Image: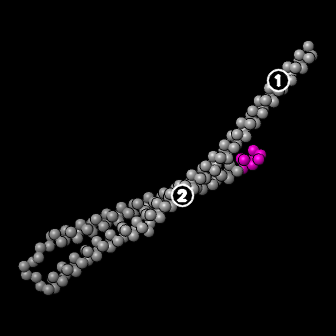
Amino acid sequence: MSTYVLYTLRDLRLDGERQAERALAEAAAARRRADEETVRLETRATAAQAARQAARDGAAPPLVESAADAQIRRRFWSRLDAETLACAAAVVAHRAEICEPAVRAEAAARATHLRARQRREVVDKAIARREAVGRLEQGRRAEADADDLAQRRTRDE
C-alpha cells in the first residue's frame, strides 16, 4: 500500500471521526435538554405536591358547611390530586420515553466516536511506520553512498 493511499485513507477516517464527534455533540446536547426538562418536571411535581399538602393542611372542616361548599372543596382537592398525579406521571413518562433513550443514544455515539478514533489511529500508526521505514532506508542509502565514496577515494589514491 502506497503512502498516498494511506494518506487518503487517513483523510477518510478523519472525516468519519469528525462526523462521529458531531453526532456525539448532538447526543450530549439532547441528553442535557432531557435532563433540564426532567428538573423542570420534577420541580413542577414538587410544587403541585406542596400545593396539595398546603390545601389539605390549611383546610379545617368548617362547623357549618353547605353541601355546595363541601362539593366545591372536594372538587378543588380532587383537582389538586389530579394535578399531582399528572405531574408525577409526566416525570415517569419523560424519564422512560426521553431520558433513557437520550442516555442510550449518547452512549452509542460515544462508542461510535471511540471506534472512529481508533480506526484513524491505526492508519496514523501505519503512516508513521511507513515513514520510519523510509527514513531508515534513506539513512542506509546515504551510508552506503558514503561508503562507496570512501572506497572510490581509497582506490583512486
Point out the stretch of residues depicted in magenta: 1-8
- Does residue 146 belong to the magenta stretch? no
Toward the left, the furthest residue is 63
Q: Secondary structure at mark 1?
A: helix
Find residue 146 and name its label. Answer: 1
Is 131 placed above or below 120 here?
Answer: above
Residue that appears at 80% across and 28% down: 142
Secondary structure mainly formed by the magenta segment: helix
- Image x and y of residue 114, in percent: 57, 51
Toward the top, the furthest residue is 157
- Image x and y of residue 11, in percent: 68, 50
Residue 42 visible somewhere in the drawing: yes
Toward the right, the furthest residue is 156
Residue 26 visible somewhere in the drawing: no
Residue that appears at 55% across and 55% down: 111
In the rendered view, does 104 fall on the left or right side of 154? Answer: left
